[in-house]
Amino acid sequence: MRISARLFAVQRHTRQVRPAMAPLHRQISGTSGTLKPAAAAQSSVEQRFQPLPFFSRDAPPSSELSRGSNVTALLKRTRPLELPHVASNTRKVSVGWSNGVTSHFHHIWLRDHCRCADCLHPVTKQRLVNTFEIPPDVQPVRAESRPTGLEVTWSESPRHTSTFPWEWLSRSSYDPPIKYSPTFNSSRKTLWDSSIQQSPPIVSYEEVMKNDTGVYKWLQKIDEFGFCFISGVPPNPQDTETLTRRIAFIRDTKYGGFWDFTSDLEHGDTAYTNLALGAHTDTTYLSDPCGLQLFHLLSHEGTGGKTLLVDGFYAAAKLREKYPSHYELLTEVKISAHAAGDADSLYIPDEPFSILRKDLKGELMRVRYNNDDRSVLKFIDPVLVDDWYDALRSWNQCLTSPDAELWVQLTAGTAVVVDNHRVLHGRSAFTGKRRMCGAYVGADEWKSRLRVLSQAIDRQAWNSEF
Amino acid sequence: MRISARLFAVQRHTRQVRPAMAPLHRQISGTSGTLKPAAAAQSSVEQRFQPLPFFSRDAPPSSELSRGSNVTALLKRTRPLELPHVASNTRKVSVGWSNGVTSHFHHIWLRDHCRCADCLHPVTKQRLVNTFEIPPDVQPVRAESRPTGLEVTWSESPRHTSTFPWEWLSRSSYDPPIKYSPTFNSSRKTLWDSSIQQSPPIVSYEEVMKNDTGVYKWLQKIDEFGFCFISGVPPNPQDTETLTRRIAFIRDTKYGGFWDFTSDLEHGDTAYTNLALGAHTDTTYLSDPCGLQLFHLLSHEGTGGKTLLVDGFYAAAKLREKYPSHYELLTEVKISAHAAGDADSLYIPDEPFSILRKDLKGELMRVRYNNDDRSVLKFIDPVLVDDWYDALRSWNQCLTSPDAELWVQLTAGTAVVVDNHRVLHGRSAFTGKRRMCGAYVGADEWKSRLRVLSQAIDRQAWNSEF
């Protein structure tokens, strides 16, 4: 059973027949909430996310909102110059936007996505309408263009009216599909090479601990660059753990939660040795590899032990530029990985994966690569075997090219966070004794935290996803 | 940085050029281990996994091994009647099995998969051979059929010989691909309907706590049926948590780790209400939804509150039988989900997913369904919208069919574990106060535990994956 806001899905008990005349929306009880400001009002100022230009061009820049300008004033200023043109036939409602594009929405789709408080819970954003009680041939009796959005009145009794805010509707367009969805792989990534050494992304422990704006700045840098240093961290595990938890809870793995270990060579484990580690991502053998990795060198009596970071997205971009067919192969061929070295665990991910993973739009969304942990190559068309090895060789060449490598000598007091879905890490060999602490944070967790902060601080609206 | 056995990937420091004549395998240090018995010796007795019949038919049944028979004796008895026929050309080595099938292995593939202790760490099963130092046109000087496996000697200096155990090689065949791989979606699932009420899968708390054989039996039932009851659990959260940890560590989520909550209606959250919940899977909005869910009703002063379980694989099989095109649509169309009800989190999975997920072989591997949490439907070809809603309606019909539903009145002392990737759960409404405790366990975790136990107790070999 789920522990958060669970809205009851069907109001029936054991094999009890549902009333034939039940209202489409389900009864809400135990929770009450008010509708947030219309998505259109909030989102129209996000120039970055605006997919279809039907709002006034004199809308203020997004920075105006973050300077604390009045939302009501903005609402007036961003009111559409001309309302979208609405028409309907027996199956769909069409919406003609001011840029000449026309979106088509099926009646069943509209009824299922009704945004009213009886059909979509205003607080939990969960569906309250009972999808399965919508007649497959549901018809509107009226569909009109209103300043607040597309207004559709349905033939059901009693009459039900749905209002779809224009901004929400334009972002939800599937016919034609919108070009840009902020949900998936939406961040603005700045690819980097070794020259980032001049000015690497960094925040201070003080600002991160002070308030959420500091955390937001930190996560934005991680989102943009795939890594970020944190300066001025007290060199002890307790404060490092507290720092980590400013993002979210720690992701437990077979290695435990928060780590604190030394290279005393007493353990039969190379993490506890002084060997060099090539650039790789971690936990490739988990179905959902760890998202962020924070580590903090607490002490090192000896030499060497430089940290290596490589932007996997930069290396992939190079690969695509120099060897496009190799890039494609690495996005297509599925491999697997394993962690079979411990007596108490034997990890194999739930299904094979590609080293470079594309999203639905065909854009790179993840790098997942540790050649040592790679399992038997057997999910491959035999005619591609030689090509795949060629592609892997090209990938290795891009990854290990000096211009891709950022080498940093970490010192106590400076922690680093790495996005394990993008940036590969490694280290050079070292002498002496080294004490390291750190932890993993799940990808869902840090991205959730970033969305919440972007909503609170930059007033970014995510309503168009729900 | 990874904390387990990390074998150094490249023996170089900052921009140091690798020696041109470096040996293909990398130096091992800090770890030592002995090779486990050859995969062929261990695996040849697993009738269930044997893909290509070249071993003697008088091999003993797998039960013989679990009764503790001598492995050396078995080795003799299961020696191949006739060695596979080996030939090679300039690009590949071919292996003719006794059933007439011929597998082809590229030279580069063979060199990269060398099973010797210098190329594959005997304990960690990590790749030690440096893939990138294998010449693309690597050639064997000799390839021979030996009782121990395919023996290949490479032209490198000093000479290197690889031996590929027959069993491992047959399971690793990609040209042609083998029909069966135990890695993914390999369990024998017994689909069930409401008649399982007569004899549901159950284990006792005592046997699970006593030894690992009890845990193995428990996990096998979860693997086969997608759920299992545990009787005789002391009705308190402490013992329930200890029971959960017999499987693995608890998966933390935004709801915390181990839960203990009551339906006191004081929280604005329907989990704390007495509302009915339709059959669904949990955490559909996480990139990797939780694997197992254990819950234990500690007390209930009131009536109602029956627990509903539905085998999603059974419902999907029904859907496929009755409406094959609807089944296909639900495996193809990607949807998304969200958890947006809490001020401190905003979850959206890393990419859209299908309600019914197929594996690489086209077989159903996962059910992920909560219609209430479903996000805007926009990753869909517009011509499929009406059909998709029809398919969803058919799916709902299969899921809510009385013959699919198992209704159970839980009582204190009987916990239940549900595989959240297969079995949907819900509850009827209830009156009075109810105290529930429970937790999630990650899918990777419980499957890892099951593999380890199957290796220890049933001597199942997983070597063919590495």
Image: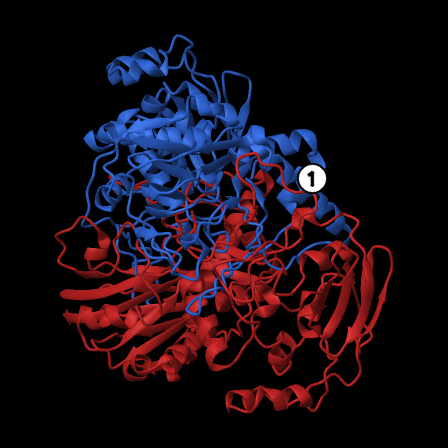
Chain colours: A blue, B red
The numbered mark 1 sits on a residue in which chain?
A: A
**B137 and A381: which is toward the camera:** B137
Q: In this view, does B192 lie above or below B383?
A: below
Residue B408 located left or right of residue B75: left
- Residue at x 24% of width, y 16% of height: A68
Give the x, y percent position of residue A345.
43, 66
Picture mark count: 1
Residue in front for this viewpoint, B409 or A422: A422
| Residue B72 visible in the current orientation | yes
Q: Is residue B404 above or below residue A368?
A: below
x and y, in percent, of residue A173 in the image: 49, 31
SS of the residue under disc 1? helix
Q: Quadrant of residue B319?
A: bottom right
Q: Residue A334's spot in the image, x, y percent?
A: 62, 52
Q: Name the residue under label 1.
A: A326
The residue shown at (76%, 47%) is: B136
Left or right for B372, reference B255: right
Position above or below: A125 against A15: above
Q: Quadrant of residue B433?
A: bottom left
Residue B311 seen in the current view = no
For the C terminus of chain B, the quadrant is bottom right
Where residue A239 appears, as percent x and y from the top left, is 22, 41
Identify the amino acid type marked 1.
Answer: His
**Left or right position of A237 against B98:** left
Q: Nearer the viewer, residue B185 or B67?
A: B67
Measuring 30% from the left and 61% from the top, which residue is drawn there? A1
**Which residue is at a point 64% across and 55% down the rendered structure image?**
B25
**Residue B185 location, quadrant:** bottom right
Of residues A64 and B275, the one nearer the viewer is A64
